[in-house]
C-alpha cells in the first residue's frame, strides 16, 4: 500500500496528457553501462521515435527499477491498487451460468484425465473474470485521457483486459516480440480454421521472417511484420570487434538449470574439451543457484550470476553455446556461435531451429566432445532470424498503421 501510494503521487498515469503512442512496457529492466535501467524492447524505439509517447510500467515485486532510461514514464500501481480494493471489498461480483459451469468442468475433467492433477478451475476462472471486471473501466478511463493513436505492448498474454479496452476504443494494438514463439506456446498457437482470440493484438512485430512460420497466429499473416530487434542490433555493433576465445557458453533457465548445470560440470570434468566453460544463469536463478546447484558452485566453472558481464559480451567472445530453449540461444546465433541443444523438456520449442540445422541436438557429453573436435563453420541466415535495419523498419510500419487510422 505504501509503495502504491508513493508511486501514485510521483507517477500518476491519470495525470498524463494526450500522446500519439502508448507503450505498455516491461517492469523487468536491464541495467546498462550508462547506469540506467532500460526496457530493452521499448527504449531503443523510443530513443528514435518521431511521435509523442507515454510509457506505462507495472510494478515488479512491488517496486520499480530506477533511474530508468525512459523519461515520460507513468506507473500502473494506482490502477492495480484501485482494482484490488474493488475485489477485496467485494464491490464487484462474478457468477457463471450453468452452461459456463459445465464448460469449465469439462475442461477441468480433461486436465485431470490427461495429467492426473485435480484443479478447481471454476474458482480460477472467476478470479480472472473479477480481475478483468475491476481493471476494464480503469483502463478505459486512462485511454480516454491519453487518446493514443496506437498502443505497443510487450508480452500480450496477461494483458488481455488492456487489449480489450483498446479494441473497444478502436485503438490498434501492436505486440513487440520478446521471446521464443512456437506452435507449443498456448499464447500464440491457434491452429485450424477457427483460430480466434478476441483479446489478441491487432498486429505482431516479429524479429524476422523465420518467426512467421513457427506457429499459426490468431491474426492474418498480413498483420505480422518482420521488423528486427533494435537492442540486439545495437549489441552486435557494440561488440563487433571482440576477439573470440576458445570458450563455451552455457545458457541456463530455471526450468532446465538443474540438468543443464550437471551436464556442464560433467563436460568440465571430462578433460576432453579445449573450451573454457562459462555458465550464464537466468536472472531467476541468481539468488538460488548455490542452494539448488551445489555441484556447480564446487566445480570451478566460471558462473555469471548477475549483470556485471553483459550477455552480449559473452556471446561476442565465445565460439560455442549450449542450452535448451532460451531466446538467448537465438541471440547467440546472431553472434555466430556454434549451437548445441541438450535434449531436455522444452526443446520442442526449438523444432524449427533444429529443422533448419541452425542448432544440433546432443544427448551426452561424449557426443558433444566428439562434435566439438570437428571444427565446422556456422552457416546461418541471420537476416531470417533478425531482420536488419530494425529501426527504419519499425518507423515504416508504425507510420503505415497510424496512417490507416487517420
Image (tube, grey):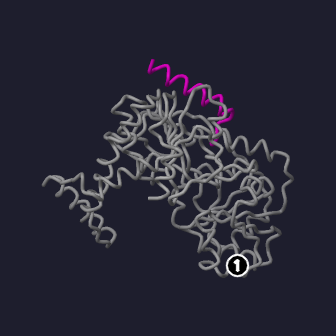
Per the image, label 1 sits on a secondary structure element best described as: helix
Q: Using a 10 Å C-alpha cutoff, classify the residue at mark 1 as few (fewer than 14 neighbours), some (14 to 19) or many (20 or more).
A: some
Which quarter shows the N terminus?
bottom left
196 sits left or right of 16 in the view: left
Q: Nearer the viewer, residue 39 or 157?
A: 39
Q: Is residue 338 above or below residue 169?
A: below
**Quarter where residue 388 is shown:** top right
Query: Image height check: is 148 above or below 153?
Result: above
**Residue 390 is one of the magenta-drawn residues:** yes
The location of residue 322, given as percent across then percent down, is: 68, 63
In this view, the residue farthest toward the top is 406
Q: Is residue 89 visible?
A: yes
Magenta extent? 385-406
- Quarter of the image holding residue 173? top left
How many numbered discs sit on the rendered protein?
Answer: 1
- Looking at the image, residue 149 sits to the left or right of residue 64; the answer is left
In-image side of 358 versus 55 (left or right): right
Where 5 sits versus 148, above or below? below
The residue to which callout 1 is attached is 297
Q: Where is residue 30 in the image (x, y as percent from the top left)?
A: 65, 53
Picture coordinates of residue 215 (x, y %)? 46, 45
Q: Could you tell me what secondary structure mostly forms the magenta stretch?
A: helix
Nearer the observer, 337 or 390: 390
The residue located at (53%, 35%) in the rendering is 54
Which residue is drawn at the image coordinates 39% and 35% (left, top)? 166
Amino acid at each position: 500500500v505504501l509503495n502504491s501510494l508513493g508511486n501514485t503521487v510521483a507517477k500518476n498515469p491519470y495525470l498524463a496528457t494526450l500522446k500519439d503512442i502508448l507503450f505498455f512496457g516491461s517492469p523487468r529492466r536491464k541495467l546498462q553501462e550508462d547506469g540506467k535501467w532500460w526496457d530493452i524492447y521499448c527504449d531503443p524505439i523510443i530513443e528514435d521515435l518521431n511521435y509523442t509517447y507515454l510509457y506505462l510500467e507495472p510494478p515488479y515485486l512491488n517496486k520499480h527499477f530506477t533511474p530508468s532510461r525512459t523519461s515520460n514514464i507513468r506507473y500502473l500501481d494506482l490502477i492495480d491498487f484501485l482494482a484490488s480494493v474493488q475485489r477485496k471489498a467485494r464491490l464487484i461480483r462474478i457468477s457463471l451460468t450453468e452452461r459456463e459451469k459445465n464448460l469449465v468442468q469439462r475442461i477441468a475433467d480433461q486436465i485431470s484425465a490427461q495429467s492426473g492433477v485435480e484443479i478447481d478451475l471454476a474458482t480460477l476462472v472467476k478470479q480472472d473474470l473479477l480481475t478483468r471486471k475491476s481493471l476494464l473501466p480503469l483502463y478505459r478511463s486512462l485511454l480516454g485521457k491519453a487518446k493514443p493513436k496506437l498502443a505497443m505492448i510487450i508480452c500480450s498474454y496477461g494483458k488481455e483486459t488492456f487489449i480489450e479496452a483498446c479494441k473497444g476504443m478502436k485503438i490498434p494494438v501492436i505486440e513487440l516480440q520478446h521471446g521464443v514463439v512456437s506452435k507449443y506456446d498456448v499464447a500464440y498457437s491457434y491452429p485450424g480454421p477457427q483460430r480466434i482470440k478476441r483479446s489478441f493484438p491487432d498486429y505482431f512485430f516479429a524479429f524476422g521472417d523465420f518467426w512467421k512460420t513457427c506457429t499459426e497466429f490468431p491474426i492474418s499473416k498480413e498483420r505480422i511484420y518482420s521488423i528486427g530487434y533494435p537492442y540486439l542490433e545495437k549489441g552486435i555493433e557494440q561488440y563487433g570487434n571482440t576477439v573470440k576465445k576458445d570458450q563455451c557458453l552455457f545458457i541456463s533457465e530455471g526450468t532446465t538449470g538443474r540438468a543443464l548445470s550437471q551436464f556442464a560440470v560433467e563436460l568440465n570434468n571430462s578433460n576432453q574439451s579445449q573450451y573454457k566453460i562459462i555458465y550464464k544463469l537466468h536472472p531467476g536463478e541468481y539468488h538460488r543457484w548455490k542452494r539448488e546447484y551445489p555441484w556447480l558452485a564446487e566445480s570451478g566453472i566460471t558462473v555469471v550470476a548477475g549483470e556485471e558481464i553483459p550477455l552480449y559480451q559473452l556471446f561476442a567472445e565465445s565460439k560455442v553455446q549450449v542450452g535448451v530453449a532460451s531466446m538467448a540461444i537465438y541471440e547467440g546465433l546472431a553472434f555466430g556461435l556454434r549451437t548445441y541443444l541438450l535434449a531436455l523438456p522444452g526443446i520442442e520449442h526449438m523444432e524449427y531451429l533444429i529443422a533448419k540445422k541452425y542448432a544440433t541436438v546432443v544427448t551426452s557429453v561424449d557426443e558433444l566432445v566428439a562434435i566439438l573436435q570437428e571444427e565446422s563453420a556456422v552457416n546461418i541466415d541471420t537476416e531470417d532470424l533478425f531482420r536488419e535495419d530494425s529501426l527504419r523498419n519499425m518507423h515504416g510500419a508504425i507510420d503505415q498503421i497510424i496512417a490507416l487510422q487517420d
